[in-house]
Image: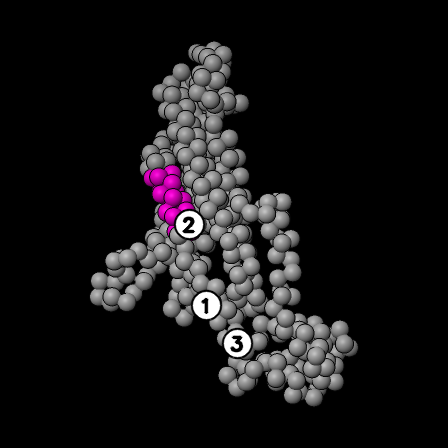
Amino acid sequence: MTSSDVLDTCLSVQLTRAADILLADMDRLLVVLKRRAFEHKMDVCIGRSHGIHAEPTTFGLKLAQAYAEFERGRARLVAAREEVAVCALSGAVGTFANIDPRIEAHVAEKLGLRPEPISTQVIPRDRHAAYFAALGVIASSIERLATEIRHLQRTEVLEAEEYFSPGQKGSSAMPHKRNPVLTENLTGLARLVRMAVIPAYENVALWHERDISHSSVERGIGPDTTIHLDFALDRLTGVMDRLLVYPGRMAENLERLGGLVHSQRVLLALTQKGARREEAYGLVQRNAMPVWRREGQFLPLLKADSDVRRYLSEAELEGLFDLGYHLKHVDTLFARVFGAAVSP
């Protein structure tokens, strides 16, 4: 048995214990996301693609998406924990020349690990690469949700914002500021976690039965990455638990484009009434562009367009502007994410 055997097995124990802590962090985050998703299940807001108003969605669906993403991240972490939960006490090149394999099996059982089926002088580092890759994906999910909150907190949007406590300072120079400092911090922490992924990949390609180019890397990324992710998950849980949400502002923003969010419904309705797709697109677009220029509202312009009216009556056009049309499958989506639960 070599010192490398002992060190590698100790590393396995440390990484599995760290994974247990991170899994507990994720469980707490999932509880909060589920509660807030149900709380805002039917709070309608504008969905955005390319940063531009697209079609209506709900804030609850945004949070349900985050819940599903972190649930996948949790499953990846469970698999990654399983991957590194191995013990290797197999000698200088992994042949058990000077140690009985039963000793390895005994130690593995006592430590809650499994014997590595076949090793060199060290446990194969593809296991560790998968572990840090899983942490990196979780960090990216943290940044994705943090970025969404940062955008929603912008002055021009202000549909949600971080909790701002009495007496808190947003800026040392401008007393009116309420900056998204926690989610900005989370974005930075995510970069630190992902920083470990490439070095972990590079640790896989060791010379022959082993060199030590990996060990100095792991002494840094092992504790630093897991501690950073632990802190980030805890911080995100606090942000989402106390997140301020403004359904009234969501409704205001939804109406900013004068009804253009219903353009696809009008387009489809025209094609269903016999208009060619390109013709229907042109009719909708030529009435949409003046609304972009703040030269009217979409529905009155459509009603006044004789070419549109050849296909659709006023009553039919008005029916296409029903907001509830976009919400009819919210329950279906919630059931897919949360199962049959009615509430958290």
Give the amino acid at mark 3. Answer: Leu
Label 1 belongs to which residue? 249
Q: Secondary structure at mark 1?
A: helix
Residue farthest to the right, as pictured: 274
Crowd tier of the residue under label 3, counting other residues whose Cα lies within 10 Å: few below 14, some 14–19, many 20 or above: some
Q: Nearer the viewer, residue 128 or 321?
A: 321
Main SS of the magenta segment? helix
Stretch of the chain drawn in magenta: 224-240
Using the image, determine if residue 314 lies above or below residue 88: below
Label 2 belongs to which residue? 241
Give the distance between the C-alpha atoms of the residues marked 3 and 2, in whole angstroms. Answer: 31 Å
Please report whichever mark, 1 or 2, sits nearer to the chain's N-terminal start. Answer: 2
Please report whichever mark, 1 or 3, sits nearer to the chain's N-terminal start. Answer: 1
Query: Is 335 left or right of 86, judged from the image as shown?
Result: right
The percent position of residue 73, horizontal first and vertical second, equals 50, 43
Give the distance between the C-alpha atoms of the residues marked 1 and 3, in whole angstroms. Answer: 14 Å
**Residue ID at (32%, 61%):** 179
Query: Is 252 left or right of 337, judged from the image as shown?
Result: left
**Residue ID at (66%, 82%):** 283
Looking at the rendered image, the quarter that the N terminus falls into is top left
Please report whichever mark, 3 or 2, sits nearer to the chain's N-terminal start. Answer: 2
The percent position of residue 272, horizontal first and vertical second, equals 75, 73
Asked which quadrant contains residue 314, the reply is: bottom right
Observer able to see residue 178: yes
Give the amino acid at mark 2. Answer: Asp
Residue contact between numbered discs 3 and 2, judged by CB atoms under 8 Å: no
Give the distance between the C-alpha atoms of the residues marked 1 and 2, in whole angstroms. Answer: 20 Å
Label 3 belongs to which residue? 257
